[in-house]
């Protein structure tokens, strides 16, 4: 299925709704085209193309609802899927948390999530981009392992209460690990964009290569508490644990880091350093995301943490109504306001510390304190008197993003980065943190 | 399907910490439709269309997977049914070699024209990428088996069990936990049926019917005054079984000082009752004093340590660098294997790979590149003796055949090397759990899996659990909390001094082992008997926040 325009999507959804006999009916339509190349040992290992589309019909009678999906779009199939959703709804148990579908919503201006250049990518463009990366590695006698993927898609929804929403988007993701031939050095780079023309696989490969070469002959230093500078890629995998925990229901139920004794939450409390400001904004030109959520709610600009104070938690429509809080969906990306310094300037201003370029295998240890564990990877360096002195062996850490953002020393400029754990894109600064807790050494390169 | 989507679907929030990546899901269908089975003859016709189209465009090898992947999720919390989801994903994935390079394309349009077009696209991708190739793909020889089939030996197809029966069970489990003092419980029954058809230009047409089940719950209890909370996950193990897994007999239960443990089958109601009591004990438990302890690890816990520290580093694709950009490489480099004397563990450590063990998650007749499955030694008397390989890697380690470790989580995913069931063999001497505990002076007995993390070459790991019992002078003296152990893989396995006998051998496993880019999930089991490890470093994980 080609990417439908707003008008084409509207016409198709209107037709689907015309078949409905349910009290309420809501239809979500989406489609995407994409492909990827994975390479390792300096050759392509897997590569593929995939095109998918689906139409999801949700029919409701009272508090009973049924969902059916189809990927065929002739009239008979469309009617059939509506009938099936209605049959399933009649058979379903009542859902006490069912919410009537939303009426028409205001979504504001379209968000610039779509790029023609990305949508036009095919096997040749992917192979060209990978060739640039492989050449860069081969010229320097380094081993490259990387992944490039691109997709273009659209989503639309309409319901019997008059709601209609549409968005189309593209995305391209590239990540690369460069290892020295002796296996003693490893470096990494990751980039994500909506617009493919911003991607420079040669330059990103060069960054990974530089880290790989600089990390050879790493020295072991004692684990313990250190001042660290975390590059944005490392910041992403720590902070997203905090973003994922901004859920109102978990907080109200007393089982998250946002909970307080007696059924209260930490909303309104000074939880973090007062320089911490975290928000989401679908129209940010560096990190555009859809201006509506899959359940039809608008995605607007929302302050989650302001001057270190928890301002808002996200919630389902049911939970928001039950508790009387603002009905905010979880955002598609998060932005932390940074400072003005470059990473190099942060290093220059550091007497003693460790530069962490990447953190890896992050897993929760204690949900109450948001303590997580994980390891440094692909380039960790000792800083003394404002200079990188030597590479150090990787560490395991046990640290909480909440404790970390209380031990904030300095922030650099925010930039777009990608979490290697969740593949989510963020705008985040490099952070200089005091007393970051490394608990053991790892021999891994 | 991403982990976050799963969280959204189940509403379990923090409970999803126990679940990593989730496989691709499909279209929602009625429960009855899951009981339909597509005639292999029809799948053969479609496969031949794909193979002929690829060959006509210049492919020198083609395999076709016509896959129907069915999932059912019955999801409840406390006294509510949250969601009942039946999904079907049906389509075809076509993998070719052209100009010595792999190409892949997939479609869910099951008419002959669309399938032929997908096959042609796979060939054009292979040709486009062949300019990036440094050497041509070399496949281990594989004979065609003709038209064959394999069915998981289940007793009761979970998809045939009425949803009401599953809902009633889960609500009774929830009720028991709440009456036992839990504040919250989320409970789920996942069932999976993979109906896979594989055809290749080697002359195989293989039809397989695979079943898996995972009943699980997650309990939370809160101290209202302090706001402190503790959780306890189910001690079930996901299994390659039918609904009979939920029909536990007396012989499936092991009574220990910590309560009942399960072997082969699971009593969900009983476990929920004991979990509600244990989560209360956890709230009052003593915070662990950090230091060196002898650890006695139950199979419900040890499976995950085996998975991370032996299963992954012996995957040949990791050893060779194919996973360098994501999951990582391996410390078990080829020179260690070639030396034939790399002491991975103590003499007590015998670890096997097995793709055939009945009731395990990894059991199949043939893998996803048409190789008949078997079993082999990986660690023998503590020494590294073998890896886990697929067809295009076998020649690198001098094998003349694949070990049958190829798997794709969906028709739309490219098959690649995935972990076989990797299991620690039981000890040869008679030894019970009680004996193990009796022999420990200062130790911790750990039951159930918890937090887990390991580096990209599998040297340094950290694991938590569900239940921690302090052992002093051969006796359990009480429960501990805030426990995690950190170790180096080789040191840890060399500190293994005793493994219980085969009467204690049990399987644990993962429904959602994530690997690859784009990420794919596979299900895999790991067996062991209760094992003891001496002098392991234990840290205290308690912290304080504002």
Image (cartoon, coloured by chain):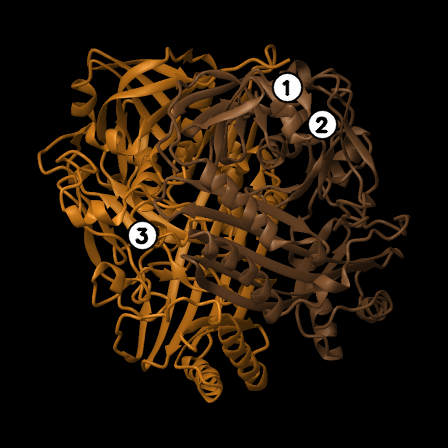
Chain colours: A brown, B orange
Question: Is residue A347 something that shows in the picture?
Answer: yes
Query: Looking at this view, is A223 or B379 the one in front?
Result: A223
Q: Which mark is residue B11?
A: none
Q: Residue at x 24, y 40 (%)?
A: B528
In this view, which residue lies farthest toward the left? B429
Query: Looking at this view, is A83 or A208 the one in front?
Result: A208
| Residue designated by label 2 | A341
Say which quarter of the image contains residue B223: top right
Tell me the crowding category of disc 3: few under 14, some 14 to 19, or many 20 or more residues within 10 angstroms, Cα based: many
Q: Disc 1, disc 2: CB below 8 Å?
A: yes
Q: Residue at x 23, y 67 (%)?
A: B401
Quarter of the image with the C terminus of chain A in it: top left
Q: Is residue A345 above or below residue B523?
A: above
Q: CA distance from mark 1 to mark 2?
A: 10 Å
Q: Chain of mark 2?
A: A
Pointers 1 and 3 within a single chain: no
Q: Along the horizontal axis of the image, is A32 left or right of B162? A: right
Of the two numbered discs 1 and 3 in the rendering, the one whose residue sits closer to the viewer = 1
Tell me the crowding category of disc 1: few under 14, some 14 to 19, or many 20 or more residues within 10 angstroms, Cα based: some
Q: Chain of mark 1?
A: A
As helix, strand or loop, the secondary structure at mark 2 comes to loop
Whole-percent x, y for residue A332 in the image: 71, 44
Q: Which mark is residue A349?
A: 1
């Amino acid at each position: 299925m080609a990417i439908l325009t707003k008008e084409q999507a509207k016409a198709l959804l209107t037709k689907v709704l015309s078949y409905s006999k349910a009290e309420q009916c809501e239809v979500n339509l989406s489609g995407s085209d994409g492909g990827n190349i994975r390479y390792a040992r300096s050759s392509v290992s897997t590569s593929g193309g995939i095109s998918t589309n689906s139409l999801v019909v949700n029919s409701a009678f009272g508090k009973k609802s049924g969902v059916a999906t189809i990927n065929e779009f002739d009239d008979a199939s469309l009617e059939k899927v509506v009938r099936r959703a209605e049959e399933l709804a009649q058979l379903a148990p009542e859902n006490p948390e069912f919410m009537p579908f939303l009426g028409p919503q205001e979504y504001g201006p379209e968000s610039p999530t779509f790029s023609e250049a990305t949508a036009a990518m095919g096997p040749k463009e992917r192979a060209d981009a990978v060739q640039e990366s492989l050449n860069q590695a081969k010229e320097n006698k380094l081993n490259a392992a990387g992944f490039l993927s691109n997709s273009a898609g659209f989503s639309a929804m309409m319901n019997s209460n008059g709601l209609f929403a549409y968005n189309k988007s593209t995305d391209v993701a590239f990540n690369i690990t460069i290892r020295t031939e002796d296996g003693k050095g490893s470096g990494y780079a990751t980039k994500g964009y909506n617009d493919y023309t911003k991607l420079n696989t040669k330059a990103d490969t060069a960054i990974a290569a530089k880290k790989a070469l600089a990390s050879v002959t790493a020295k072991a230093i004692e684990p313990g508490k250190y001042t660290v500078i975390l590059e944005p890629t490392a910041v992403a995998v720590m902070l997203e644990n905090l973003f994922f925990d901004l859920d109102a229901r978990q907080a109200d139920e007393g089982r998250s880091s946002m909970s307080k004794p007696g059924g209260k939450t930490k909303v309104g409390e000074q939880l973090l350093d007062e320089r911490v400001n975290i928000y989401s904004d679908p129209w940010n030109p560096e990190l555009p995301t859809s201006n509506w959520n899959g359940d039809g709610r608008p995605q607007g600009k929302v302050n989650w943490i302001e001057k270190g104070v928890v301002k808002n938690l996200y919630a389902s429509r049911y939970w928001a109504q039950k508790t009387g809080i603002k009905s905010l969906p979880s955002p598609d990306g998060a932005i932390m306001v940074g400072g003005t310094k470059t990473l190099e300037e942060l290093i220059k201003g550091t007497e003693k510390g460790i530069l962490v370029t990447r953190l890896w295998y992050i897993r929760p240890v204690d949900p109450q304190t948001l303590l997580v564990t994980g390891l440094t990877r692909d380039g960790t360096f000792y800083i003394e008197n404002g200079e990188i002195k030597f590479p150090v062996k990787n560490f395991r850490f046990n640290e909480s993003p909440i404790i970390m953002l209380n031990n904030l020393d300095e922030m650099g400029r925010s930039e777009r980065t990608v979490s290697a754990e969740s593949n989510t894109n963020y705008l985040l600064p490099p952070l200089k943190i005091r007393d970051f807790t490394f608990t053991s050494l790892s021999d891994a390169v | 399907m991403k982990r976050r989507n799963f969280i959204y679907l189940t509403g379990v929030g923090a409970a999803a910490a126990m679940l990593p990546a989730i496989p691709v899901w499909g279209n929602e269908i009625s429960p009855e439709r899951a009981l339909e089975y597509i005639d292999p003859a029809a799948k053969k016709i479609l496969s031949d269309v794909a193979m002929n189209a690829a060959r006509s465009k210049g492919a020198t090898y083609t395999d076709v997977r016509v896959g129907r992947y069915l999932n059912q999720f019955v999801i409840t919390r406390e006294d509510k049914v949250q969601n009942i989801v039946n999904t079907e994903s049906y389509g075809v994935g076509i993998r070719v070699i052209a100009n010595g390079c792999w190409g892949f394309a997939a479609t869910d349009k099951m008419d002959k024209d669309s399938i032929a077009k997908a096959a042609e696209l796979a060939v054009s991708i292979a040709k486009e990428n062949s300019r990036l190739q440094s050497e041509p793909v070399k496949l281990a020889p594989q004979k065609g088996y003709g038209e064959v089939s394999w069915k998981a030996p289940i007793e009761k197809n979970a998809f045939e069990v009425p949803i009401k029966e599953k809902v009633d069970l889960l609500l009774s489990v929830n009720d028991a936990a709440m009456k036992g003092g839990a504040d919250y419980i989320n409970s789920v029954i996942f069932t999976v049926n993979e109906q896979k058809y594989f055809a290749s230009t080697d002359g195989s047409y293989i039809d397989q019917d695979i079943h898996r089940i995972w009943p699980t719950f997650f309990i939370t209890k809160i101290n209202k005054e302090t706001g402190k909370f503790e959780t306890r996950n189910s001690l079930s193990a996901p299994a390659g079984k039918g609904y009979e897994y939920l029909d536990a007999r007396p012989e499936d239960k092991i009574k220990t000082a910590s309560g009942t443990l399960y072997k082969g089958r699971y009593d969900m109601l009983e476990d929920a009752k004991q979990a509600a009591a244990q989560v209360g004990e956890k709230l009052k438990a003593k915070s662990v004093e950090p230091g060196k302890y002898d650890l006695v690890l139950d199979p419900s816990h040890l499976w995950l340590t085996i998975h991370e520290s032996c299963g992954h580093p012996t995957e040949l694709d990791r050893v060779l660098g194919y996973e360098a950009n994501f999951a990582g490489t391996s410390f078990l480099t080829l020179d260690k294997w070639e030396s034939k004397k790399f002491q991975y563990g103590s003499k007590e450590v015998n670890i096997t790979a097995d793709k055939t063990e009945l009731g395990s998650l990894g059991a199949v007749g043939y893998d996803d590149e048409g190789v008949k499955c078997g079993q082999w030694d990986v660690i023998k008397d503590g020494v590294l003796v073998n890896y886990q390989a697929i067809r295009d890697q076998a020649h690198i380690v001098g094998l003349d055949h694949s070990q049958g470790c190829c798997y794709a989580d969906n028709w739309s995913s490219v098959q690649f090397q995935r972990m076989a069931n990797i299991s620690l063999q039981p000890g040869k001497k008679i030894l019970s759990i009680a004996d193990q505990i009796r022999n420990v002076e200062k130790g911790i007995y750990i039951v159930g899996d918890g937090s887990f993390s390991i580096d990209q070459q599998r040297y340094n790991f950290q694991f938590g659990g569900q239940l921690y019992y302090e052992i002093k002078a051969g006796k359990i003296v009480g429960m501990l909390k805030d426990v995690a152990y950190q170790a180096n893989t080789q040191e840890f396995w060399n500190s293994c001094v005793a493994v219980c006998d085969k009467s204690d051998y049990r399987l644990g496993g993962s429904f959602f082992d994530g690997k690859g880019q784009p990420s794919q999930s596979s299900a895999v089991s790991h067996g062991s008997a209760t094992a003891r490890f001496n002098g392991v470093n234990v840290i205290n994980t308690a912290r304080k926040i504002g």
